Amino acid sequence: MRILFGNALINTWKNNKVPFVKNMIGRAYKKIIVVLVFFTLPACSVVGGLWYERIDQLIANQFLEYASFTNAQENYVRQATLEFKHWNIKNELPKYKKLISQFRFLDNTTTVDDIDDIYQQGILLGNNTRDFFLPQIVEFCKTITNKQVEEMAIYFDELMKERKLELENEEGNFQSSLAKSFKRFFRLMGVKLNNEQINTVQILSSGIEDTREQLITERIQWNQQFIAILSLRQNLNFEEIFIKHINSLDSENPNTRILINQITAEIIASLDEKQREKFQKRLGRFEASIDQIIQEQN
């Protein structure tokens, strides 16, 4: 679930100090990046595989920080995340491997349509994770107390204050932040961007509107509505209201997505021989890690 287990997954990733793509790039590629993160600690397939082995515990531990839950509730969360790990290995990792392979073999003819196709597939995979957790979250919410709802409200409020503070303390302007984010993203892919490629990012990103403050404001409002909906958790129509609200999260600006995909396509098309070799080698490690995890599961 995006607000609960989904946020726990993202926070687990951040707390383990894995390079991640922030701001709008993160919003555009997070469905793809989350799975890549499983296999990049620290750019070693074996270590990445070991980290993934504990992914259920890491997600559960982060989630359990949201409030003071009972032993029964904690057991429910840990069982849900364990089932998620097994389900993800069996049903989703082969799909992620296929997607990574598609990304890996992009060449100097790469177009915006190629990147958008990968992005759309990533969205579908992310939705699969959401749909897996949704029934369990609905049932879990019916067990929480008013005190726990209050604690969750405080947690989300503090989280948004941290986001605001991060934004206020961020060095440089929005375009320089975007450039840094793209550099981080491609470094995760094994590629160090050259000056010409960084210049491409800076020129094209000038058309991307800085809506970060607006996004934080919208998330605060969404969180407040979420907490209010939890007060209806014993109502007969709670599930319908809850699901509708969850599905309203993370709407995107299509123009932003187009520009981000354009930047990504142009950089991948411009990779020199050495960069492309490292790019394919790094993504090949991700694929090998997935194979290893699937084999160990079987």
Image: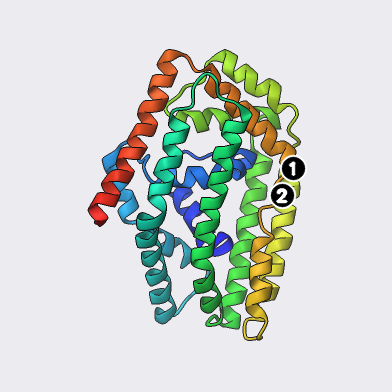
Res. 173 in view: no
Amino acid at circle 1: Thr
User: Residue 221 vs residue 133: left or right?
Assistant: right
Q: Quadrant of the image for the N terminus?
A: bottom right
Image coordinates for residue 82, horizontal then vertical, percent: 36, 65
Q: Residues within 10 Å of mark 2 (few under 14, many from 20)?
A: some
Report the residue at 37% width, 60% height from top.
85
Q: Give the distance between the C-alpha atoms of the residues marked 1 and 2, in whole angstroms.
A: 6 Å
Q: Which residue is mark 2?
A: 215
Report the residue at 65% width, 55% height from top.
161
Report the residue at 30% width, 39% height from top.
288
Q: Residues within 10 Å of mark 1 (few under 14, many from 20)?
A: few
Which numbered circle lies on residue 148? none
User: Residue 12 vs residue 122: left or right?
Assistant: left
Image coordinates for residue 185, horizontal then vertical, percent: 51, 33
How does the figure colour the protein chain or chains? rainbow
**Is disc 1 in contact with disc 2, using a CB cutoff of under 8 Å?**
yes
Res. 253 in view: yes
Q: Which residue is mark 1?
A: 211
Q: Dividing the picture into quarters, in which one does residue 156 lie?
A: bottom right
Amino acid at circle 2: Leu
Report the residue at 41% width, 75% height from top.
76
